[in-house]
Amino acid sequence: MIKTDIICVGRLKEKYWSDAVSEYEKRLKAYCKLNIIELKDEKTPEGISVADEEEILQTEAGRIKQYLNDKALRLVLAIEGRQYSSEEFAALLSDKMNSGVSEIQFVIGGSLGLHKSIKEGAMLLSFSKMTLPHQLMRVVLLEQYYRAHKIMRGEPYHK
């Protein structure tokens, strides 16, 4: 069973996000050993300078790096990443698992995104060209990861 970490900057505050995440955590237990790591996000006041944004991104990156495993396949959610269909995403994961990958780490940034040091050396994955809230992205990622497992096993769900 593949070990999967979802490293997230920021916590889920609303119950409806937590409920959706819990549902997919329950569903994914049959396919992977899932670990969701929530990291503190920095307060981002309106109108901050570019230098202050960089400092916030570096601080959050420092927290993320504590959990990164160089041996894991790192998929970083970034708007500039590659977009896949559900079938292509499943095929990508299947190819990686068949080639010996035993651990996957997904990384979701906070409101400012992710520092470039987190993106370096990672596969960049995008679900849309639109900017979406990180809470919603966690739910979308879990749903697509579950869907990919169903596709890989040829199980019904994915229509």
Image (cartoon, rainbow, N blue to C red):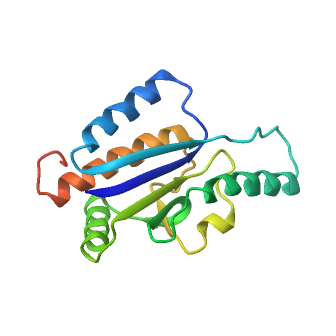
Q: In which quarter of the image is residue 10?
A: top right
In the rendered image, residue 69, in percent from the top left (x then y), is placed at 51, 65
On screen, residue 65 versus residue 57, left or right, reads left
> Residue at image x 37%, y 32%?
22
Place of residue 29 in the rendered image (x, y in percent of width and height, measured from the top left) = 26, 43
As drawn, the residue found furthest toward the bottom would be 99
Task: Tell which residue pokes out farthest to the top in this image.
Answer: 15
Number of numbered callouts drawn:
0
Q: State whether residue 48 is above or below residue 14.
A: below
Using the image, determine if residue 46 lies above or below residue 81: above
Residue drawn at x 76%, y 38% is 43
Q: Note whether 22 is above or below 114 in the view shown.
A: above
- In the rendered image, the quadrant that contains the N terminus is bottom left
> Residue 52 at what x, y percent from top left?
86, 51
In the image: residue 156, left or right of residue 140: left
Task: Residue at 58%, 35% (x, y): give it.
Answer: 11
Q: Position of residue 136 (x, y in %)?
A: 48, 39
